[in-house]
Amino acid sequence: MTIFSRIPKVDRILEQDEVRRLLADHPRPTVLAAVRTALDALRAEARAGSLREQDLADGAVAGRVGREVARSTACSLRRVVNGTGVVIHTNLGRSPLAERVRQRVDDTAYGYSNLEFDLERGERGSRYSHVEKLLCELTGAEAALVVNNNAAAVLLALSALAGGKEVIVSRGELVEIGGSFRIPDVMQQGGAVLREVGTTNRTHSRDYRQAVTSETGLLLKVHSSNFAVVGFTAEVTAPEMVAIGRELGLPVMADIGSGCLIDLSRFGIRGEPTVQEFVSAGVDVVTFSGDKLLGGPQAGIIVGRRAYVEPLKKHPLLRAIRIDKLTLAALEGTLRLYRDERQALAEIPTLRMLTASADELRLRARQFMRRLRRGVPASVRLASLDGVSQVGGGAYPLLELPTTLIAVDADGVSPQEMEARLRRMTVPVVGRINRGRFLLDARTLLDDDAPAVISALRELAS
């Protein structure tokens, strides 16, 4: 009898107790599709010569079916364990929210809210009022506005302030970031006319002055975000641009990308300007993201002088890019934590990860490994080693943060197979491979990730 002939038929699998329980909990077509997928996998393994006798046992086949049902019925967008060491990981949703913010989002999601209702006056209000005062308080700006992301913030500002006019920007700041977001393209879409000045590596104040004409509407500064120009370089600082703008009667706008509200230099993280620095320098309009260094939800935040921010609130484009109630709830909750800097550093996950010391990370890795060892079989081996993490999210592109890595080995499983299989678990575990080992970075592992990692490693070992 060949091994193909011993592969069970569909009707026999459906009679197994474990599969009957699946039928009680799920639609029959879902379970049938899972059975057929499991059978296809068994036949493929038989053709490849890798199918074992124990794979054909009733429990093993039913287990395959159960895992396929779980996979096919799981939501596409789901929680992931980030063991990569990239703190602001764009592909993994960037910044996780603070635990304290969760209740605010839940309260807003599961009931009605005063999204656009002024409770004091009993009349229609503005959704933007929920965060404007907070943003002005934290940044020192006169006015603020929030839209759905920073690209939209830049587009809105350019459309409202410089539509049909020239915008002067340094060649060294014509950036492209992830998803082919290019500053020149956004300017064109906003109706602004790009006027490049300077060179890729050096731009001077005189370049801006010489480029100004009667058609100029705005001076724009763009933070380099995800790259760095080093060596023989020169750039015009924000205060210098403000001086030029005042001299020539032109507004100055700065797209600073990551949106840092706390000076992190005392933690050895240097080179990223804060929003407050640009506001205090007199920049008329400052745009930045809510989900990068700020550590909140995806949002595009605009702060600056009232004379330039107020027209943005009346622009017809605003309705197309406005922020929704859940994002507003998460952003307000995050911003309130910044009223106490110590609280922000302790509770906002992005800040907590970025500022964790090498000693803290060694301790965290030891504690995490201790929990894993109690829950995984002896065939899974763990070891710690020194390594580096990255900030991610287009911030600090050259910075490497010292960290402790957890190396995972399992009998009969290569690092490449381990990476692929852990990535496909019910709660995916995403790590990295370096020098032939699968690694999890203690910096980006959350405290409540351990049960998911234990479950994934158990299944891997089985």
Image (cartoon, rainbow, N blue to C red):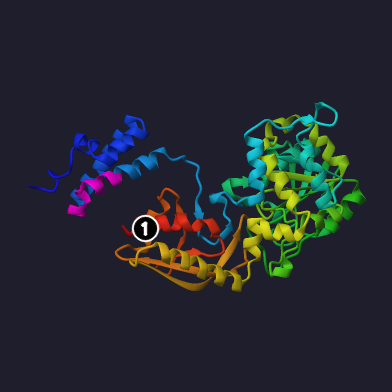
Crowding at mark 1 (Cα within 10 Å: few <14, some 14-19, many 20+) = some
Front in this rendered view, residue 109 or 355: 109
Measuring 67% from the left and 67% from the top, which residue is drawn there? 230
> Residue at horizontal 89%, vertical 55%?
243
Judged left or right of residue 280, residue 17 is: left
Q: Is residue 112 above or below residue 352?
A: above
Per the picture, the main secondary structure of the magenta-coloured stretch is helix
Local secondary structure at mark 1: helix
Q: Which residue is mark 1?
A: 458
Residue lying at the far top in this picture: please name it: 123
Mark count: 1
* Picture coordinates of residue 157, whole percent (x, y): 76, 40
Please say whether residue 324 is visible from this viewpoint: no
Tell me if 396 is positioned left or right of 273 in this view.
Answer: left
Q: Position of residue 332 (x, y in %)?
A: 73, 44
Question: For the C terminus, which image quadrant?
Answer: bottom left
Badge 1 amino acid: Arg
Q: Position of residue 55 (x, y in %)?
A: 22, 51
Residue drawn at (50%, 44%) of the image: 78
Is 239 in front, or is 128? 128
Q: Is residue 197 left or right of residue 434?
A: right
Q: Residue 174, image x and y in percent?
A: 68, 51
Residue 317 visible (yes or no)? yes
The answer to whether residue 109 is magenta is: no
- When asked about the image quadrant of residue 402, the answer is bottom right
Residue range of the region highlighted in magenta in the rendering = 50-64
- Asked if the magenta segment contains residue 51, the reply would be yes
